[in-house]
Amino acid sequence: MVARTVFPASGVPTNAAVPADNFAAIAMEPGNAVRVGPKIHREKRILKTHIFQKRSIIPAPVDEVFAWHERPGALERLSPPWDAPRVIRHTGGIRPGTEVTLRMKAGPVPYRWQARHETYEQNRFFSDVQVRGPFAVWRHAHRFSAEPGSATAYEDIIEYALPFPGNLSATANRMIDRKLERIFHYRHATLAADLADHLGTHGPKSMTILVSGGSGLIGASLIPYLTTGGHRVVRLVRRQPRPGNDEIFWDPATGRLDGKPLRDIDAVIHLSGENIGEGRWTAEKKRKIVESRTKTTALLAKTLAALPHPPRVFACASAIGYYGNRGDAVMTEADDPGDDFISDVCRQWEDAAAPARNNGIRTVFLRIGIVLTPAGAALKKLLLPFQMGLGGKIGNGNQYMSWISMDDAISAIRFCLVTPGLEGPVNIVSPQPVPNHEFAATLGKVLSCPARFAVPAAAIKLAFGQMGRETVLSGTRVIPARLTADGYRFRHPDLETALRHLLGKV
């Protein structure tokens, strides 16, 4: 199995065939110490190995492409969100002897995968082998070579063998090749787009960035994206910091945050907040929703404002709930808040950042829309019913959904950090919001599962009360006017493109 993809400056891939070859000829060039062979002796059996190859042209210099892979977070960025492993142990880096242990699943069955890096030559190649896992043989070589125009030919070459007899192995090989093609198309597209972000925009190439809410859905994707871009990320945590992990303790409930460790911080991204989309909004839940946002924001803003040399930018999360239920009226950052509970929460949330703003810190309010990822939140909840053929619109389906892909969400947040004139509210949404019925139809199309069913509005109201009315049944048609005006280029401007990338349905 061989495939070649070109990622031009436009970001649109083109495919072309390349000649098939055996692993030895591809991976064992002069000076390469990868030891391979077409047949492996194991337990007195001869296992015939199979080759998978993926080659892409990445529009970035070879030293930058290689360096990206050496930085913390590369494994997390390359893991597809529809089948993301959990890192149990990682000794760090890609040099020979370093190891990684992952918790993965084959359908519903969990298993561990342990790999060890074996060979390395800077800007040319590195390789790893399976130490423990489901394959009889698994060797993975990563090759890099310079191309004209400061581009890089990047190749993944995998030699594997299954612990099955011949006929069964041939069928399984075809299935595995199809799965690998999905995974590596995602990996190469993500690599190309991330490098285009980090190398193609203005602003400092390396910052020390403080992040709160780093273990949340957005933070878990944002941090690897920043570290592979060459930035140092320091996390705010509410437990005892682990030595050597760039963590700082804080306790918003008691107002504890020591400003001394923050003196070398260049930028702050504040993402903390109680999940609004789980359970009914009782009086206690509403109190937690408000205070988890206002108290944390006020503590950070006051602490940053008091520093002798405060950070250049403070990016504080907010939400498009600021605008409330506005039907099909188009909302921009210039519009006033709505009059429901979530609107008031967002208003208080943004007001709490006043100390930082008043002290001259460039403050950005990230009014984040519906972030799409199969790893969590709305899209994850929708996948199972759609895959079972039970998907469809919610209520009358006319309520607008202002969505954004996870990759665009984290990319837009970084864009806000490095764009000097960008401050105040910024809508973190795609330029093409869609009604719920269109969202359902598009998701059904991508999954090849027609969206024939509908969830009655009465059922949502009965199950979730006010939360259901203000989040699931409410419609807000928001556009990213500030991002567009300042030149941000969306990776996934339309819904079908976004869903196909996120779900590996290319």
Image (tube, helix red, strand yellow):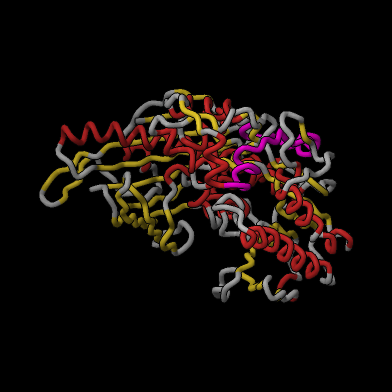
Q: Is residue 130 above or below residue 52?
A: below
The verdict on residue 205 being magenta is: no
Instruction: Using the rendered view, name the quadrant where residue 489 is placed.
Output: top right
What residue appears at the point 52 percent right and 39 percent down from the top-left corner?
A: 459
Which residue shows up at 51% across the image and 37% down it?
A: 502
Residue 99, horizontal then vertical, whole percent: 39, 60
Describe residue 258's horizontal placement relative to residue 276 as left or right. Answer: right
Split into 4 quadrants, where in the image is the N terminus? Answer: top left
Q: Is residue 489 visible?
A: yes
- Front-lying residue, 118 or 411: 411
Does 232 sit left or right of 54 as displayed? right
Q: Is residue 466 magenta?
A: yes
Please name whichever residue, 443 or 59, is drawn nearer the observer in this view of the structure.
443
* Visible residue check, residue 61: no
- Boundaries of the magenta span: 465-493
List x then y, in percent, for residue 447.
44, 29
* Res. 273 image quadrant: bottom right
In the image, is residue 12 above or below residue 472?
above
Residue at position x 42%, y 25% from top?
Answer: 448
